[in-house]
Structure formats: C-alpha cells, structure tokens
Amino acid sequence: ASKRGYSVPQRIQFIRGDVEKLDEAFSMNNLPMEMFDACISNGAFCLVPDKSKAFGNVFKALRPGGRMAISTTTIVSDSLDPSFEWPVCMRMFASLESIKPMCERIGFKNVRIVDAESPMEGMEIPIEDESTNNDDGRQRFKIHGRYADQFTFLENMDM
C-alpha cells in the first residue's frame, strides 16, 4: 500500500507469502510469529492443498485472542464420486462439515461457520446469450473452457 502512495498507519502491516510456509514469510520480513490481531482471506483457502497446515500456520501467526475470518468455497460431502474426473479445483475444496473440527483441533476457539448457501442466482448466462460463439467469432463455453463437455454433469449436481 505504501509503495502505491497510500498512507498506512505504523501499526498496520501486510505480508505476502505461502500460507503453508508462513514461517518463511515471517522470517524473510524479520517478523516474530504470534504478532497479528487478524487474518482475513477471501477466496484463497479453497485452493490450498494442505488446509490443516494452512489453518495451523494462521493460528501460529495470530496473537492470543487474534481472529481469523475467511470466505472459501466448500463441497457438501467429504467424498466426491470417484467415477467422475472432477476438476482440480473441486478436488481441492474441503467439505463444509470438516472445517469447524479442523480449526478446533488446531486450537481455535468459538469457531463459527456461516453457510451462505450462495447459489449465485442471477449470475447464470442468460439463455438468449448461450450462443456458441463470442462476438469475435471465437467459440465460448459455459464451464471449464475447451473441456466443458467433460463437466456438463456438474450443472445438475447438488454440491
């Protein structure tokens, strides 16, 4: 923020690093662990391969009494049907019911899960716009680009 010309109060710090290797980011920035009051993540945790390690590192980075708030995509069930070749992103999602116990095992207290049940209504491609070509003539797909035909079954699944 400072590099972009924004004035940032001295007490506010941002660090960038791999949440699975957060200790390295702290070390590179000469920062001690247990120094942050809050961790906020919007949409990144769903793609972290080792969620338990990531949540554990965030826990270590927070001061006692610190808070974490994340928004992440989850799946309803712990097991996806193995007969389908699921997109990589979906194989990375944690199940909704696994997050609270995982965070509690790590040491977080007062864990609260708010299930927004966001069906993304109103964000679908309108039927009249579902042509197979863009204005520039290139073929377009509703899901997963050129692999769309492999994942059309996802449209009617309750995940």
Image: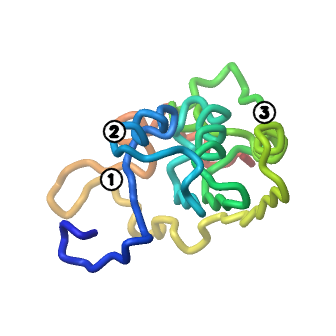
Q: Is residue 10 left or right of residue 138?
A: right
Please identify, in this view, whether the residue under mark 3 or under mark 1 is nearer the observer: 3
Residue 70 vs residue 151: left or right?
A: right
Residue closest to the far left: 136
Circle 3/circle 1 CB separation < 8 Å = no
Q: Amino acid at mark 3?
A: Asp
Alpha-carbon neighbours of circle 1 within 10 Å: few (<14), some, or many (≥20)?
few
Q: Quadrant of residue 64?
A: bottom right
Q: Nearer the viewer, residue 32 or 71?
A: 32
The residue at 43%/69% (across/down) is: 12
4 up-or-down from 61: above or below: below
Image location (x, y in percent) of residue 136: 14, 59
Disc 1 to disc 2, how far (Cα)? Answer: 49 Å
Q: Where's residue 57, x and y in %?
A: 59, 39
Which residue sits at x=64%, y=61%?
69
Measure how far apart labels 2 and 3 are at the Cα level. 36 Å
